[in-house]
Amino acid sequence: RKQTHGDRMVSSIVSLSSTETPTSADTDSSLDNTINPTTDHRSKHKIIDDNDDEDEKDNERDKKEKEWLVVSTGKFIGKDSVPLGQLSPRSIRGTMAVMKGWAKRNSKSSALVVERLLRRIVDEREAGNEHARATTAMYTVLID
């Protein structure tokens, strides 16, 4: 069998010691188009597609989380919220999860929502709801 350029290339690379790397003498420009996962155009598209899928999933998760936050927040401080002094113990416990959700969003407006939620707990206590207690953890969420 006649030795082809590809066979010579493989022979050259195989004969190199583990500390040597192929040089331009070992290769030629016609092999620049060999498939390489980091440079092959098909791989680039696949990587981009994978990232797009992940970004799309992240965006969908973020959208659902924000919807949940808005609905949950409305139960505490919205126009349809429970009257002052009447939040149930379960609802009061739930405010911490909502506060943490807003705090993760890292924006000025999110911080203001966390502050308003904390204010609702303080106002609940002042309105006579003995289950309502602003905890150190709640203040920490606000500060962080």
Image (cartoon, rainbow, N blue to C red):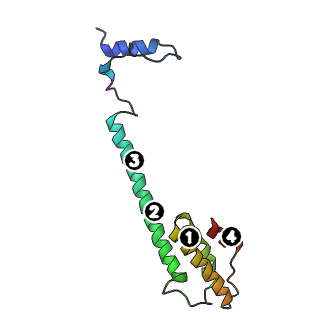
Q: Which residue is mark 3?
A: 50
| Earlier-in-chain disc, 2 versus 3 | 3
Mark 4 vs mark 2, foreground winner is 4
Q: Is residue 94 visible?
A: no
Residue 123 picture quarter? bottom right
Q: Residue furthest front?
A: 108
Q: Position of residue 13 (x, y in %)?
A: 43, 15
Q: Amino acid at mark 2?
A: Arg
Q: Position of residue 25 (x, y in %)?
A: 38, 12
The span shown in magenta is 32-38
**Residue 9 marker:** none
3D distance between C-alphas at marks 4 and 1? 15 Å
What's the amino acid at mark 1?
Ala
Residue wearing tag 4: 137
Could you tell me how far apart the alpha carbons at marks 4 and 2 are, in whole angstroms? 26 Å
For disc 1, the marked residue is 111
**Quadrant location of the C terminus?**
bottom right
For the N terminus, give its image quadrant.
top left
Which numbered marker is on residue 61?
A: 2
Label 4 or label 2, whichever comes before in sequence order:
2
- Kindly check if marks 4 and 2 are in contact, taking CB atoms under 8 A apart as contact: no
For marks 3 and 1, the one nearer the N-term is 3
Residue located at (37% from left, 33% from top): 39
